[in-house]
Image: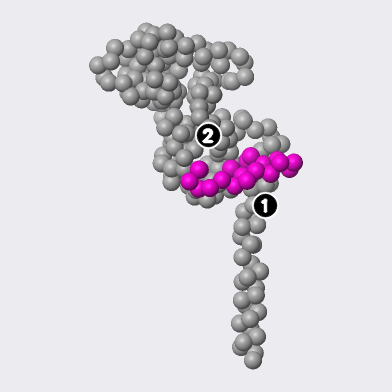
């Protein structure tokens, strides 16, 4: 099914709306340039709009700065599409003490299978597996921190849904996969399997002790 792209006017209104600007806000010419850079693609416009909102752009020169930033990102040859450029620019603009953890969590979402609802405790385990190396194991973050970092990604439209029921656009998921080499991804999956196996078997000795005690009681 072929879906029509929005018109230039609709795309600009979508950008301004996502950025939290009122409908009667006069759009700077840079806004038109930005949606054109996004190729009128709704996902790219949505992420760009959240970036505009986060940066609190007001003056025309501020708008010009964000367009220039995205063009530079696109022109450096490291990204293959406009969507990738917009996603990467949005990630780079994240600020605050949790910046590295938010970016790391986004990257670790590459380990989440497609069309799968993942509980928050499992996301914490995925974070641990994705951020660990054989030389430097990562610790597992608390659920409250996973929720906080997810909110940042959701606010930027990098992750869809709610904190308890997230989903990824296919383009975004492809981006997260590109953040790993094939070997890094293989190792991350191996560590995740080891962590989940350990969690499943951790209570097994207690179960065995309980069974053994029960058996002795019956035989007695």
Residue at image point 61% right, 82% down: 214
Task: Give the x, y percent position of residue 83.
Answer: 50, 23
Q: Is residue 123 visible?
A: yes
Q: Is residue 173 visible?
A: no
Q: Residue furthest front?
A: 97
Residue at disc 1, secondary structure = helix
Task: Give the x, y percent position of residue 52.
Answer: 41, 20
Does the stretch in magenta take in 142?
A: yes
Depicted 51 relative to depicted 207: above or below? above
Q: Quadrant of the N terminus?
A: top left
Quarter-wise, where is residue 161 in the image?
top left
Does the stretch in magenta take in 113?
A: no
Q: Residue furthest bottom?
A: 220
Q: Which residues are magenta?
A: 126-146
**Location of mark 2 (residue):** 98
Depicted 171 relative to depicted 35: above or below? below
- Residue closer to the observer: 182 or 143: 143
- Residue closer to the observer: 39 or 160: 160
Task: Give the x, y percent position of residue 157.
Answer: 43, 31
Find residue 107 and name its label: none
Find residue 194 and name its label: 1
Residue at disc 2, secondary structure = loop
Depicted 40 relative to depicted 159: above or below? above
């Amino acid at each position: 099914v072929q879906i029509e792209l929005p018109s230039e006017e609709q795309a600009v209104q979508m950008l301004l709306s996502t950025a939290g600007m009122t409908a009667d806000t006069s759009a700077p010419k840079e806004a038109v340039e930005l949606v054109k850079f996004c190729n009128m693609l709704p996902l790219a416009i949505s992420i760009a709009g959240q970036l505009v909102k986060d940066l609190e752009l007001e003056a025309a020169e501020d708008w010009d700065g964000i367009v220039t930033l995205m063009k530079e990102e696109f022109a450096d040859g490291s990204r293959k599409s406009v969507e990738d450029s917009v996603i990467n620019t949005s990630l780079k603009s994240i600020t605050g003490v949790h910046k590295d953890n938010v970016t790391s969590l986004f990257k670790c979402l590459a380990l989440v299978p497609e069309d799968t609802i993942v509980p928050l405790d499992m996301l914490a385990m995925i974070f641990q597996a994705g951020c660990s190396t054989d030389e430097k194991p990562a610790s597992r973050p608390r659920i409250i921190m996973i929720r906080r970092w997810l909110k940042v990604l959701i606010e930027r439209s990098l992750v869809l849904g709610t904190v308890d029921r997230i989903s990824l656009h296919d383009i975004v998921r492809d981006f997260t996969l590109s953040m790993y080499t094939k070997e890094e991804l293989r190792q991350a999956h191996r560590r995740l399997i080891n962590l989940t196996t350990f969690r499943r078997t951790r209570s097994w000795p207690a179960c065995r002790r309980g069974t053994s005690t029960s058996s002795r009681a019956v035989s007695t």
